[in-house]
Amino acid sequence: MSDSGNSLFYMGVRMPVSTALQSVSSPSFSEEVPALRHDWSRGDIAALFEKPFMDLLLEAQLNHRHYFPANEVQVSSLLSIKTGGCPEDCAYCPQSAHHNTGLPAAKLMQVQAVLEEAKQAKEAGASRFCMGGAWRSPKDRDMDMVVAMIEGVRALGMETCMTLGMLSPEQTIRLKEAGLDYYNHNVDTSPEYYEKIISTRTYEDRLNTLALVRQAGINVCSGGIVGMGESADDRIGMLQTLANLPEHPGSVPINMLVQVEGTPLDKTEPLDTFDFIRTIAVAKILMPASVIRLSAGRLEMTEETQALCFMAGASSIFAGPKLLTTENPDQLSDQKLFEKLGITPAQTCRRPEIIGEAVAS
Ligand code: SAM
Ligand code: DTB
Ligand code: SF4
């Protein structure tokens, strides 16, 4: 670890942990930089979920400040570059051809049109542009356009992320060579619950693509969805999978299910808000050097819920009026929320070790 051995960010400055802890009146927390572990048991994780809410949030926030500046949230923007008609049957997804959601399908966008959207996102304050394709996996014939999109967005000075489904080894290498910064591929839920949500691919398929991406040296973005009717043990199992990967994903998006009419998961009993916030806090404690993204579902959340998610260690959001196909809070309401909370947009959400190129896991 770097010089942050016994200091952390508080009130915008790095200070000794003891001083920061006095400021939050909590002598009971360790000054040690939280180690990056990859051997979490379900019992360990369950014990975190059972902590008193305030203790859990404080621990998560202190862990966060060992690795990241306080009060900064990175902003990403999303674009669906190929929409709908997907052969996979993911029960949550409005883009699956197996569900009748009324969403019109569209072919892969032209490169220039994607770059126009990226420019606008940059002007609106996004530092990363995430492009999503409703594919089981991309066709090789689509790769030239995908590569041109990555190169074009990078030339605008933005970080790039793609989420295109399963990849072949050759496709993964092409993405790396194009300069792709992040590949998003979510494990979505626990290994046990996965087959209740998706029948057209396996958990193993998902882990295989994550391994290809990691081995190619592309930063991994992987997280999941809660509020799909899963059990508390499924949320524990999902976080266990992510935290016990050979390297913690650089980004961990935690999505609250966006319920869409026509999908099998529409009208699912919503998850208790505190259980959602706890999931974010536990993710931060398990993977303290990773950026936890408060991802889909913010439109249905109050400002207070989002503030507690930031307190729990979330330090990234998707901004802009649209996610891939569903709505998201508009720019003005996010700006107002940041002002109310004294949050400033971070220029990057890369974890510190990645900036130094010395991966510490
Ligand atoms: N087809 C690719 C794949 O599945 O990896 C990429 C696009 S897919 C839409 C990206 C991610 O969006 C999914 O893995 C899932 O976690 C998330 N997602 C899709 N529909 C959602 C919904 N209704 N609510 C919350 N998250 C959703
Ligand atoms: C992620 O974890 N969430 C984003 C992004 N990665 C690609 C997608 C959310 C999609 C929500 C439903 C929709 O808008 O279609
Ligand atoms: Fe297709 Fe991805 Fe939606 Fe599943 S989540 S149906 S793979 S677009």
Image (spheres, helix red, strand yellow):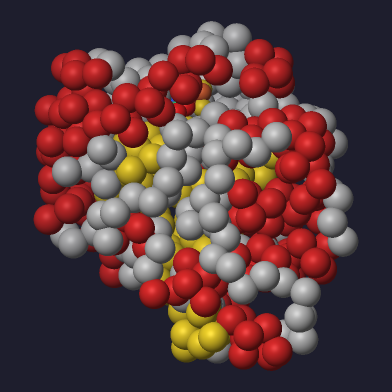
Report whether 158 appears left or right of 228.
left
Residue 146 appears in the picture as rendered: no
72 and 117: which one is in front?
72
Which residue sits at x=76%, y=62%? Answer: 56
Say above or below: 235 vs 70: above
Q: Residue 15 location, x and y as percent?
A: 51, 87
Residue 211 appears in the picture as rendered: yes
Which residue sits at x=63%, y=85%? Answer: 18
Q: Residue 151 location, x and y as percent?
A: 13, 45
Which residue sits at x=72%, y=85%? Answer: 24
Say above or below: 168 vs 60: above
Number of marks in picture? 0
Place residue 303 in its image quadrant: bottom right
Report whether 271 appears left or right of 186.
right
Report whether 188 appears left or right of 120.
right
Which residue sits at x=39%, y=74%? Answer: 3
287 and 89: which one is in front?
287
63 and 105: which one is in front?
63
Q: Residue 74 location, x and y as percent?
A: 43, 65
Q: Quadrant of the N terminus?
A: bottom left
Farthest residue to the top: give it. Answer: 200
Q: Residue 103 location, x and y as percent?
A: 51, 29
Say above or below: 224 vs 343: above
Report whether 15 appears left or right of 230.
left
